Image (cartoon, grey):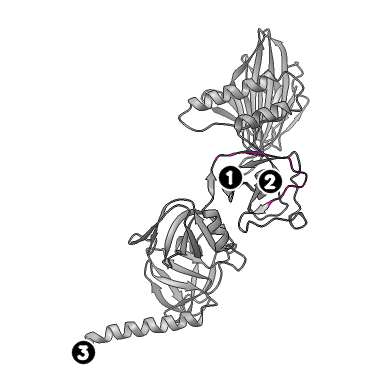
């Protein structure tokens, strides 16, 4: 036998041993993985022993995990299968070193309807080859998936003509092939809106199975008269269903999407929804201010090319608080309206009333994650200040707005451990006084400082 023929034979023996080993460990394999680290990935013979290095896999080389990952542990060892051997991989952060296609759990949906046209490839690396162009709304079987289940994900799939490959796509998942195929033929409408529930006993369907959800299982809290934000709808066999998220409905931690049939209520677009909330508002004052807010905001949004600042206003809990009377012959008001699509967001506007007209101030106060907003007269001069509690990335903080130089503007922001009493601020950690509203300049005050508030100014007390 010539030496040059030995390499192919040994290579075939390696592949056959690997294949036999894969069959043997088929039920143990939890994911198929590829080396993503340009320096390779070391595998070890003994768990916990960095001196027992057996082999270093090359970039993009394939292997299998026989143990699930533990994302709560920064450094971890996981059993792997490579070349027919059980070895161990060590990493402090696997996501940066591998591309892992995990197998699905028994209770996970195994079929997906693709939301966009996508190319099926033999891999998702730089050297990938195209296998087939999958049209939008194709049905595929999910073999393995990376990252979170839902949204855009990298997946290993099997097509309906039995081709196996990889895709990167947005999709909807379903519990069976028949349900997936039924949904793939649906007439989709991606218009968002609100659904007014009118049925005395509304019916909800699980999006994955298209089967009814029972209240005894999920403690449904949606009832007749409630409004649900819906992000799309689809017509299946002459019935239109509207989709909404579980956070609005279920007392469980799992994020899921559900459907409600159109026979259970009335769909409203933005204009219809806003008019409904104005008509049914608890606010008993002049409703013209609500229409003014709606019309001015929509006009400004349609003229903006930089970003979409468009709001869906919910005026059911609208408030219009007088801040000051007859200040330079004008009255000032604070308007507070809910942003309907975001439960934790309110939009605040300051209006001045002059010669029978409400004029929106140049200052708009708008925050995400507001817990509370209240008015108070800190210095007792009859002009109300506005104290807004804001959810920050690390700590919640307050921002104070007051009348200064003839208009309402930001005075300071500070953490909640600052105490306000009898017009005096006792500074805790992080207190920033705004010096210039236009340049966003601030002056910091150390802990323990006492500041007296008077007519929009903070005066240090020695």
Residue bearing the label numbered 3: 2
277 shown above or below 72: above
Label 3 crowding class (10 Å Cα cut-off): few <14, some 14-19, many 20+? few
Can residue 409 be spotted in the picture? no
Q: Is mark 2 on a helix, strand or loop?
A: helix
> Disc 2 versus disc 1: distance between alpha carbons?
17 Å
**Magenta stretch: helix, strand or loop mostly:** loop
Comes first in the chain, label 2 or label 1 = 1
> Disc 3 versus disc 2: distance between alpha carbons?
72 Å
Q: What element carries label 3?
A: loop
Q: Where is residue 333 in the image (x, y as percent from the top left)?
A: 69, 19
Counting labels gives: 3
Q: Residue at x 39, y 63 (%)?
A: 123
Comes first in the chain, label 3 or label 2 = 3
From this viewpoint, which residue is outermost toward the left? 2
Q: Which one is in front in this view, the residue at disc 3 or the one at disc 2?
A: 2
Q: Which residue is drawn at 54% across and 23% down?
A: 299
Q: Which mark is residue 233?
A: 1
Q: What element carries label 1?
A: strand
Left/right placement of residue 77 relative to residue 256 reads left
Residue bearing the label numbered 2: 248
């Amino acid at each position: 036998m010539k030496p040059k023929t030995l390499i192919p034979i040994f290579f075939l023996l390696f592949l056959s041993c690997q294949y036999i080993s894969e069959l043997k460990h088929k039920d143990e394999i939890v994911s198929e993985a590829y080396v993503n680290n340009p320096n390779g990935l070391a595998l070890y013979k003994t768990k916990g022993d960095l001196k027992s290095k057996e082999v270093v896999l090359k970039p993009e080389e394939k292997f299998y995990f026989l143990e699930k990952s533990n994302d709560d542990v920064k450094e971890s060892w996981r059993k792997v299968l490579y070349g027919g051997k059980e070895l161990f991989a060590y990493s402090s952060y696997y996501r940066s070193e591998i591309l892992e296609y995990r197998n699905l759990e028994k209770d996970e949906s195994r079929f997906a309807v693709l939301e966009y046209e996508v190319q099926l490839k033999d891999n998702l690396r730089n050297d990938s080859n195209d296998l087939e162009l999958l049209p939008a709304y194709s049905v595929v079987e999910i073999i393995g998936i990376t990252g979170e289940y839902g949204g855009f994900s990298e997946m290993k799939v099997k097509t309906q003509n039995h081709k196996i490959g990889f895709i990167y796509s947005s999709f909807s998942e379903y519990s069976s092939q028949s349900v997936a195929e039924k949904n793939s033929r649906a007439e989709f409408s991606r218009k968002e809106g609100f659904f007014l529930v009118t049925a005395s006993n509304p019916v909800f369907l699980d999006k994955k199975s298209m089967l009814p959800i029972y209240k005894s299982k999920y403690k449904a809290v949606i009832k007749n008269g409630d409004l649900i934000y819906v992000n799309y709808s689809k017509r299946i066999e002459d019935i239109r269903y509207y989709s909404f998220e579980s956070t609005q409905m279920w007392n469980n931690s799992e994020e899921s999407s559900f459907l409600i049939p159109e026979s259970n209520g009335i769909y409203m677009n933005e204009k219809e929804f806003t008019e409904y909330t104005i008509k049914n508002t608890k606010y008993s004052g002049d409703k013209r201010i609500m229409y003014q807010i709606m019309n001015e905001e929509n006009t400004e949004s349609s003229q903006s090319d930089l970003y979409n600042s468009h709001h869906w206003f919910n005026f059911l809990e609208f408030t219009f608080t007088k801040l000051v009377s007859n200040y330079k012959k004008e009255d000032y008001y604070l308007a507070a309206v809910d942003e309907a699509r975001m439960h934790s967001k309110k939009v605040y506007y300051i209006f001045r009333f002059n010669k029978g007209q409400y004029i929106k101030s140049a200052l708009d106060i708008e925050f995400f994650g507001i817990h509370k907003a209240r008015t108070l007269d800190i210095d007792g001069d009859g002009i109300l200040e506005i104290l807004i509690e804001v959810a920050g990335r690390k700590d919640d903080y307050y921002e104070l707005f007051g009348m200064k130089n003839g208009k309402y503007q930001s005075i300071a922001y500070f953490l909640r451990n600052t105490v306000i009493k009898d017009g005096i601020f006792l500074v805790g950690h992080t207190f920033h006084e705004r010096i210039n509203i236009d340049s966003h300049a601030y002056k910091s005050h150390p802990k323990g400082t006492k500041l007296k508030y008077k007519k929009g100014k903070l005066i240090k007390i020695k």
